[in-house]
Amino acid sequence: MQSAIYNAYFGFSENPFNISPDPEFLYRSPQHEEALANLIYGVRGRKGFIVLSGEVGTGKTTMLECLRDYLDSQRIEFAFIFNSRLTPDQFFDMMAYDFDLQCDRKSKTDVLVALNALLVQQAERGRTCVLIVDEAHNLDWDVLEEIRLLGNLENRQGKLLQIILAGQPELDRKLDAPNLRQLKQRVVLRCTLNPLTADECAAYVETRLAHAGMTRQSVFSPEVLEEVARRSRGIPRLINLLCDNLLVTAFAMEQRAASIDMLDEVCQDLRLEWPGSHRGRGRSSRYSMDEELPQTPYAVGD
């Protein structure tokens, strides 16, 4: 994103609308506070399986980054699997690497023995371990079954391994499949991130601007913020994309405030559609119904 272009112009200390999942820019809406509290509670309470779901761009990875900061602060061992397009062997290899297990990482048996030893060691110290899997909706069935079996690692005090699966709504539908009913029954906590409301969208934008150094923002009028909320459908990633491009446009036009015309131009450039946009609808054909269509000089399939 073109952060350096307008930061000095607007007096920002950093890019306010970077799409990277930075916990420093977390907008603590009630649902985000609740989701983070549930994740931490699930880990501390040794609940076992926790599912975090939400549409694309609603902030799931940011939630996981906040959780990772918490785990680091509490010195809790965790593994973070960010690439879910894995075979079972690759999954165990990545998990062993992230937990820094001292074993033959190509051997599933050795990985399980080393993992169990780590879990027991941490439990004896009054601690737990956490496995976080992002983009879990992409996991193959056999990998999900391996993850379910990891949930059997427990003692009398609770689960030795806390497993967090984060993904798009397809993950919820996948867990509803009959062949995964055993895994579904083990899910103790579910957290869902929904799109922001119009008021939350305005507060989200103002929070990010304030963190970047503009405590009393005047770039986005209430009318523009309302349109940003409508056209982004409350998806934080799209809000960031629209606002970043609006700031670039305002800077290029030497303006201090964004306008609806600028937003129209940005949406057109981004090929963005939203409810009621009717982009491309009602467009008349270049040729009348009774006019013979021009012949193409190319054969079909070229």
Image (spheres, rainbow, N blue to C red):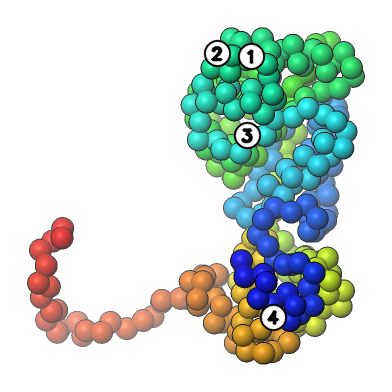
Q: Which residue is mark 3?
A: 81
* Nearest-to-viewer mark from 1 and 4: 1
Q: In this view of the protein, can residue 172 be seen by the observer?
A: no
Amino acid identity at mark 1? Cys
Q: Amino acid at mark 2?
A: Ser
Where does the image place residue 86, in percent across and percent down from the top left?
Answer: 51, 31
* Quadrant of the image occupied by residue 213: bottom right
Q: CA distance from mark 1 to mark 4?
A: 57 Å
Q: Residues within 10 Å of mark 4 (few under 14, many from 20)?
A: many
Q: Is residue 20 above or below residue 260?
A: above
Along the polypeptide, which appears first: circle 2 or circle 3?
3
> What amino acid type should be assigned to the residue bearing mark 4?
Val
Q: Quadrant of residue 181?
A: top right
Is residue 46 toward the left or the right of residue 230 in the image? right
Contact flag, marks 4 and 2 (Cβ < 8 Å): no
Above or below: residue 204 compared with residue 142 = below
Question: How far apart are the alpha carbons under marks 4 and 3?
Answer: 38 Å
Amino acid type shown at disc 3: Ile
Q: Residues within 10 Å of mark 3 (few under 14, many from 20)?
A: some
Residue 224: assigned label: 4
How many numbered marks does the figure carry? 4
